[in-house]
Image (tube, helix red, strand yellow):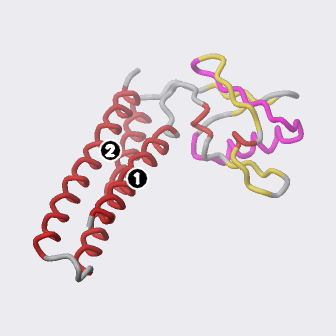
């Protein structure tokens, strides 16, 4: 019984953490190395995250500097950033790739918030699926009485509500960050 609750709680916490990590990759108009976490570089035939092939720094609030450890990768890094959905224009020289992060327009900000909210809904569905699976597991366990199952359902619902509230709070902070000029 407690095991079902613990598993559900852990899975919901993992989902909240995954949302926190995912939301860091959303562009906000300020340079952040995490923006490039999803960008994959063709590293000798193997798709590899940029942050595993180069040093990424933010010397200025609107500038990202990528310094590949292998200088032959500079063009690969540029190509990978151009292919990404970040709408960034990398500029390369012999040593580094520079990316000037343009200020976001109001329209782009609203689109990013809309996109974030769609993704948020997917994470909420994950939480609800965990709830459903946990309740189903409790109901299928014949050693647990109906009264105890009802108690588990109540506890899992509380966990679900709490997790969804956390997701919403994280999203509100990011939305404020996105909408700030």
Tell me which segment is drawn in magenta. 61-86
Residue 107 in picture, x, y percent from top left: 40, 34
Left or right of residue 157, residue 114 in this image:
right
Disc 2 is placed on an element classified as: helix
Residue displayed at 15% across by 69% down: 148
Residue displayed at 88% across by 28% down: 94
Magenta span contains residue 144 = no
Residue displayed at 42% across by 40% down: 112
Q: Which residue is mark 2?
A: 167
Residue 150 in picture, x, y percent from top left: 13, 68
Q: Classify 10 Å Cα crowding around label 2: few (below 14), some (14-19), many (20 and above).
A: many
- Label 1 vs label 2, nearer the camera: 1
Spot the residue most to the top.
Answer: 60
**In this view, 71 is above or below 158:** above
Considering the image in quadrants, where does the C terminus appear?
Answer: top left
Left or right of residue 53, residue 171 in this image:
left
Disc 1 is placed on an element classified as: helix
Q: Classify 10 Å Cα crowding around label 1: few (below 14), some (14-19), many (20 and above).
A: many
How many numbered dots are placed on residues in this image? 2
Q: Is residue 117 or residue 13 the one in the foreground? A: 13
Residue displayed at 44% across by 41% down: 20
Considering the image in quadrants, where does the N terminus appear?
Answer: bottom left
Give the number of the disc on residue 181: none
Spot the residue most to the left.
Answer: 147
Q: Which residue is mark 1?
A: 15
Residue 38 in picture, x, y percent from top left: 60, 47
Residue 14 in picture, x, y percent from top left: 42, 52
């Amino acid at each position: 019984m407690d095991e079902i609750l613990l598993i559900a709680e852990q899975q919901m916490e993992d989902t909240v953490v995954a949302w926190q990590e995912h939301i860091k990759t959303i562009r906000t108009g300020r340079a952040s190395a995490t923006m490039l976490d999803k960008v994959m570089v063709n590293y000798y035939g193997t798709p590899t995250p940029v942050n595993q092939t180069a040093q990424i720094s933010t010397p200025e609030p609107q500038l990202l500097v990528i310094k590949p450890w292998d200088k032959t990768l500079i063009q690969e890094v540029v190509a990978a950033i151009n292919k990404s959905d970040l709408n960034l224009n990398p500029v390369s020289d012999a040593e580094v790739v520079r990316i000037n992060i343009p200020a976001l327009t109001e329209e782009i900000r609203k689109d990013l918030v809309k996109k974030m909210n769609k993704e948020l809904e997917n994470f909420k569905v994950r939480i609800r699926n965990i709830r459903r699976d946990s309740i189903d597991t409790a109901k299928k366990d014949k050693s647990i009485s109906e009264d105890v199952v009802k108690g588990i359902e109540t506890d899992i619902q509380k966990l679900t509500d709490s997790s969804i509230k956390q997701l919403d709070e994280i999203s509100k902070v990011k939305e404020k960050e996105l909408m700030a000029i």
